[in-house]
Amino acid sequence: MDFQLTDDQRMLIDTVNSFTKKDSHVERVRQIRENPVGWDRAVWAKMGELGWLGVPFPEDVGGIGGTFLDAGLLIEQLGTTLVPEPYVPSVIVAGLTVSNYGTEEQKQKLLPSMIEGKTSLALAYVEKQSRYDVSNVETRAEKNGGDYVLRGKKEWVINGQSADHLLVSARTSGGAADAGGVSLFIVEKNAPGLKISSVECMDSHKAGMVELEGVKVGKDALIGEEGAAAPILERAQDYGAAAACCEGSGINQSTLTMTRDYLCEREQFGVKIGTFQSLQHRLVDMFVQVELCKSTAIMAMLRADSTDEVERKRSVSAAKKQLATGGFFVTRQGIQLHGGIGVTDEHNIGLYFKRMHTLCALYGDEAHHVDRFSSLPSFTANVS
Amino acid sequence: MDLSFSPAEIKFRQEAREWIQSAMPPSIRTKAAVDGAFDHDEQMSWHKILYKKGWVAPHWPKEVGGPGLDVAQRFILSEELELAGAPTLSPFGLGMVGPLIIQFGNKTQKERFLPKILSGEEVWCQGYSEPNAGSDLASLNLRAESDGKGSYVMNGQKTWTTYAQYADWIFVLARTDSSGKKQSGISFFLVDMKTPGVVAKPFLTTGNTLAFCETWFENAKVPAENIVGEPNMGWTYAKALLGHERTLVAGVGRSTRQILRMKRIAAQTEINGKSALEHPGYRGRIARLEMDLEALRMANYRTVAGAQLGKAPGPESSILKLRGTEIQQECFELMMDIMGHHNLNWFNAPGTIPAREESVASEHNYLRAATIYAGSNEIQKNIIAKMVLRLPGT
């Protein structure tokens, strides 16, 4: 057992930390509201230049051959100032899926340019009725000669409004909720029949609402085997959940620090409000949850790529549930302890709260992960 | 970073697990198999078995009889003992006065007391709290006055002296000077329970067990050589002990065992033709608790890994007592809910309800003490607010 960082990891954290402090202040979250891209292409390119977008990828696609853990540590730092660039949806959720399951041609086509910060990706798997069930897919892909024709709708595609390539799940066989029969395709943003409209999310980010009206893709657009994408998508969703835990841990730490500082500076009844025991204990309760979230984020980072599928799912679900309870608690109480100013758009504490809200809704909410955790064979092991 | 145990640690875990199973006498094993509660005699017989193996005081240094296990091995051993449902040993000698004597005692005290703590020949209890000194422990009032002839005379009362009725010795914080700050006039005494004037009276807890005593000292004469360290320095010593073995306070192994017990009870409990384990409400609650325990386990692992590198327990360790005791309580609260009418059972003849459920209600009630003893959780929060979060004082 070892929780020490390597020198390389420490250096990475320091570099990202100095970037968030100097070049990506929280104010950027307000600035992107007016930006149709939803984030800043120049910053994305800069992240590519620094090698950050290639952290979890092998060298043959332009990556630096790091691990999920390395990426997780980076994401945690990005969370501290709510950096809006689409690291999680593009690099982690879509990027790792291509890297793990794509063909050599697909990897070379999608990854090097994204790693350089020239393009970005998005995974379109959510539908109106699907919630977090990756097999619940109504979008269909009909075979047409050697090609596929995609018809259907995808919702809340994170970074879908700006991605150059979408990974789209569609049913090649079976009924709407069957585990088998789901396939995954690469779709270019300019493909005829593809309509993407941009919607606002609570956290000032944007998402794509996607309509596929007879979008034609070749067989070379298929990721993995036809009809076998459910486990790929489940793993992608787990990557997203683990990354959300890392980002949430960064959010927690900033929220705790801001709130602590506020208690030490704000005066009422002639004293610093941090002298009041009820507020002190509330801040301690927040601290406890911050530490628990950090602990489970580490667990998720280390096990997101576990070859033991039960262990991976068990750990990621436990971590995401911890974020949903603990992270919510921290950011909600952060507002409470700030009082009235905490409820204004002007104050940053609300931005952290809103981003935490989004992270909790993405990649499986609390109920989903509690349900999955208790459906794993580990839950009933040794009971009888 | 790596969450896995080393091959040597995995081997140690296996050895510990096998040894525990083979070493438990049939009576204890039978009881452990249905999660029974152990009495004092059973505890002491298990103490002696662990003593023979050399594992009774895993955290003691080798030169005073410890087995020389490292932090991870100690954590593993404690986890395996808890998982096996083995009797919990009394912490007062092995975990409290023993380490204090090791750190602050003189040679004579070490030779006189440590071997018998290890062997279980002498049982200890703790004389800290008083009727008017609970969370504000430093305001304690039991007086020890020098008689000028090499002894101190003690007068006063201690309370919540857990299992004092079985104890041969008691360690006592007593006031030897009331002239200065309340913390600075306290001395740490080792007192023979057979001393004339020392009387312990057990009383019933909400768990219907005689776990607590009131202990009176009436002109009890204690030789001056039974002061540990310097007179009037007792508060400093007692505080130094607080950080001791903090990696184990979370009771992660014990709660893991209780969750398994809970699932076994749930699997045998029928609700509308299905087991409670399949009941969506209970299933979800059990899962949430198990996930909470996983979070605590990870926080605990971070402390263990830190301690192994020789680091003093960091801020993450201060949450172990808080969350550990809350989760211990939640385990029993949920078990009580799952048991339904069986949770009404109160010390009836065996067989009235399933054996595994028999001690749940009593343990549930007694465990209300977990968030109170060893510094109530509110006091823990005060400490974190001040020491970790550096919030302003009043």
Image (cartoon, coloured by chain):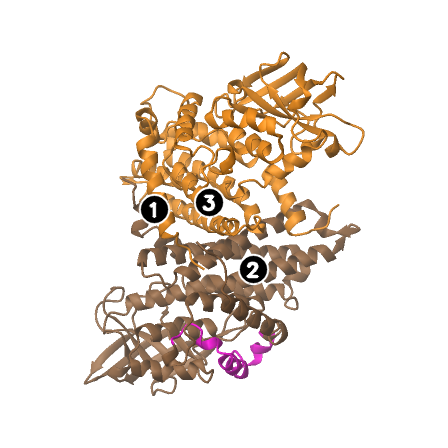
Q: Which mark is residue B70?
A: 3
Q: Is residue A185 above or below residue B304?
A: below
Chain B, colour shown: orange
Q: Which mark is residue B392?
A: none
Where is residue B156 drawn, in percent x and y?
Answer: 68, 19
What segment is highlighted magenta in the picture?
A29-58
Q: Main secondary structure of the magenta part?
A: helix
Q: Please name the amino acid that badge 3 sits on.
A: Asp
Question: Residues under labels 3 and 1: Cα distance?
Answer: 14 Å
Q: Are marks 3 and 1 on the same chain?
A: yes
CA separation in Å, label 2 and label 3? 33 Å
Q: In the visual, does A281 lie left or right of B162?
A: right
Q: Using a 10 Å C-alpha cutoff, classify the residue at mark 3 as few (fewer than 14 neighbours), some (14 to 19) or many (20 or more).
A: few
Amino acid type, residue under disc 1 in the picture? Lys
Circle 2 sits on which residue?
Answer: A252
Colour brown maps to chain: A
Is B377 contained in the magenta span? Answer: no
